Amino acid sequence: MAQLRTRGIQWWRHVRTESVSRSRPRHARGRRLHDLLCTRPLTIRTDLVPPAVSVAEPGAGPGAGPSADRIVGASVYGRPMEDRWTPEHVLSLAPDAPSRKAATKLSTPAPWSATGADSVSLWGECKGSGSTPYRTVVDLTGPAYHCSCPSRKFPCKHALALLLRWSGREEGEAPIPDWAGAWLEARSAKSEQRAEREADASPAGPDAAALLAAERRLTRRSARVAAGAAELEARLADQVRAGLADAPTQGYGPWGDVAARMVDAQAPGLASRARELGSVSASGPGWPSRLLEEYGLLHLLASGYRRVDSLPEALAATVRARVGFTVDAADVLRGPLVRDRWLVLGGRESVDEKLTTRRIWLRGSDSGRDALLLGFGRPGVAPELSLPTGLLLDAELAFHPGARPLRAVLGTRFGAPMAPPEAQAVPPGLRLDAALDAYGQALGDDPWLESWPVVLHRVVPTPTDLGWELADLAGPEPTAIPVDRRGTSDTGLWRLAAVSGGRPLTVFGECGHRGFTPITAWYQDGSRICTLGVPS
Amino acid sequence: MTRTQNRDSGSTTWPDLVTTALLGTDRRPVPAAEAAQQLLDQAALHAVERRAGLRPGSATEPIALAPDDPRPALPESARRRLAMLLPERGGSRGDSSGSGSAGGSGNLANINELLPQYLAAACARGYRAPSALVPPLLDAARARSELRGDAVALAGPLGHWLAERNPDWRYVLRTPLRTDAVSADERLWQEGLFAERVTHLTRLRRRDPAGARELLCTTWATERAEDRLLFLDALQEGLSLDDEPFLESALSDRAKNVRLTAAELLSTLPGSALALRMADRARAAVSLTTTADGPRLTVHPPTSCDAAAQRDGVAASSPTGRADRAFWLSEILAATPLNVWVREIGPPTEVLALPVSDTWAQELRDAWSRAAVRQNDRAWARALLASRRGGGEMAAGSAAKLLAVLPPEERARWTADFLGRYGLGDAFQLLVACPAPWPETLGSEVLRALARVAEKGGYPWSHSGVLGVAERALAPDAAAELDALADGATPAWAEIFTRLAATLRLRATMLAELAPPPPPTA
């Protein structure tokens, strides 16, 4: 297995706590947190949405006529349908794997009747186990779904199957039934109301009293967090004074208690890092080194928060985010917007008992900027956010503030995701040393980064006696980086090996100090270029 | 491996810091008030430095390339269908319900029954599996060994390449690839793994029966008994009188199982010396006598089993505890060429019509059934099956074996007739023996029988075997009829019928998607 080596670097100076107060802000372009809270109302970019006429292009489904007036209202938020979605796109909307499977099974003609479509919606009846068929309707502009089935999954398998059939141009020609029409009407009426409300509300901005209250709450919380951070700082120093040699015998307990105190102090970021500390000493040979790294970085964060008001603004935002302050998506969208054609590099889903989290990585084809979108859903309910890997999305993103912006919020979309031109189907990648440099440079801005998203150029997934590595065999000295097994299952790696067959692949993933987490691979199958989402 | 060139962060090295932190700053010779803070500052500095300065390591040995697979890729829709049919494993945590066992999922089609058909059809049409689906395919066949032949063939050289690296898929290396290409490397026989050797022998036998036998002879004396048994099995294909001397010598083998297998192989060779010896024994035991009521068969079962008979594969005593004399009789008759009776008495129907004492009637029929199956004798199988309907008792299992000897259409016809008379009761094994898809006559007979059971209020689960075969073998046209049946049935049966119809429709779609590949453009 490849071992990561350390070399000397010109490294980031701002994080040194003693020098932070002295250093001049490097990124003086930012604004203060206060500014973020009360400037730039959300404007709806109606001027950029293609007029409703474009919706009824030739090739749009039958029955486009009657719903045309509805489209005008819906297209403020939605997007016109240039293309039918690919089956992959449809399946990416599913809340979980069993739903994907069930939907594919249901996508045969047999159970369906009275199916039909117009340019922005689909409807049909699906025979289930009961005597009455389920009534399913999909609004493509949301997309939004409605089905009379009792499933708690959302979208349900019927809605997905209906979409799959439409994607295969098998939508049927039944006219729109009343129950579907009524739901669609109600939906568009609601969204028009919402648009009006926001149009009314936006120019004035949030009222002053509410703002003041929010600020007071923030001040109170900041004080609590500061107290928590100081306590954590002291705790870390105490441990170092007494020595870390006992750490393995102390187990999780003490740090669990500290984590609980950090939760009380409303600093969830500090809490989760403190909890992690308890497990490092049990992580096998080399733990003292890893433990001291984590101690150092947590100390840096806690003491950084003590000085947060004197930090350069972007860095201060990073520190706040790491400590656990969140910023509302709406507030982020009030900040600067970056419009680009964003290539969807890949997605990952993690499920725990309370939450499904979907992460989707994008890269701007013009700006070259990396972005990470997060979507959340209850278990069994798909996060609303869903973008199929490998497609281009013309849209505006707003980045969360920080010294190294990555997390972003999706603003206006200007059309459905499209397949990139064939020449750009595979994103350009980096050699291994450049990929590690990218991570190193990102650390220069945000020292707490565990990893940075990169595309690797021509690497071969290789199982070795000591674990998996991604090898770059070009060049005189073949190099490799290990796979970070915390985010990658055996199943995923064998799939990766299968599509490679020993040949180099372009692989997107997260490159960090524990190795590389592959997320998407581009490979050739016959004459086709395919993408593989590496299962986690 | 120089770690730091830039020393303005202090002169301490990382190992020094770690040591100090482990011991505790209070233990340093001159504990400074701010020592812990300073150490943590330094640690932060170093931690970022260490992470930011990471370099790739050197690669281990490059991995060998998987051989190219020239077969065409699956059509797009068929590729998606395969992804849907294959169970998911491990990958996505927290959705154990997605583990392919969609057996009880309401009225949805049963994909567990469809996967084997999909694989067989894809194989027959010469496709290769898409590389991304080879791992789940190999996983599926690991759990269901009946899929292995087709799965390994579809996975092709990539499957082998993966199996050489992943111990979970070791079985792939033991499953022979369905090519007739014989590895030119005779060293494989001398040095290969057992599975590779069996594969090699089987392939060689297919191409050059005598050559394969001679190859086996070269090492026969030194093989282990279990291996000898399986090598001998491999000779079944392409068996001829040329093999007789070798098999005769194997009758004196040290291992009993080897002796029995050799005897069984010899008994299927009508002209073999063993078959003639058995015929002598049989004629002594069963003879045609003429009485006042006309001709009848007289049975005098052997009273002992001598060494010669034992060498010919008749065990000295019954392994199942039957009376020894009856056992010897049936062993001898089963190994006797059936044309002995044709020559002595007449065509099989005539032989079977002869009266015989009640004590032996069933023994004779069973033994002849075994002989008909072993010798693949259609005339006898047909006659035995026909005489069953006359009221003779016969286990469904042995009827199914006899059916397998008949040509496919005849099997279906016979089974349809059987269903019409006796219903579903014993039909499961017979239906399994019929060719899929079932011809219209058999299909509608099965539907009628099912409808009868449903009407009488039978339990669906007591017919799950038949329903399972029906999912595999009913023609898609039956779906409409099933819908009609579902309308009038109880909820439990309605669900069964709806689901069966869904499966049939999905199967039809699935097979249509697997259209033959376009001819390769040269």
Image: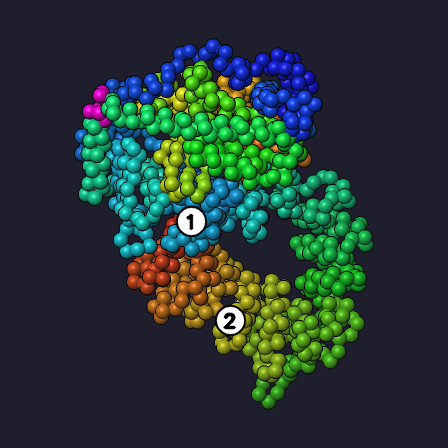
Please state which amino acid type lies under the numbered disc 2.
Answer: Ala
* Residue drawn 80% across the image and 50% down it: B218
| Residue ID for mark 2 | B386
Residue B130 visible, this orientation: no
* Res. B348 image quadrant: bottom right
* Mark 2 secondary-structure assignment: helix
Residue B433 vs A453, above or below: the answer is: below
The percent coordinates of residue A200 (x first, y second) are 20, 24
> Mark 2 to mark 1: distance in Å?
34 Å
| Labels 2 and 1: the sequence-earlier one | 2
Residue B484 within the segment the image draws in magenta = no
Please state which amino acid type lies under the numbered disc 1.
Answer: Arg
- Secondary structure of the magenta portion, mostly? helix
| Residue ID for mark 1 | B507
The percent coordinates of residue B71 (x first, y second) are 54, 36
Which chain hosts label 1? B
The percent coordinates of residue B490 (x first, y second) are 32, 64
Residue at far bottom of view: B292
Which stretch did the figure color magenta?
A: A198-204
Q: Is residue B427 left or right of residue A32?
A: right
* Residue drawn 63% across the image and 37% down it: A248
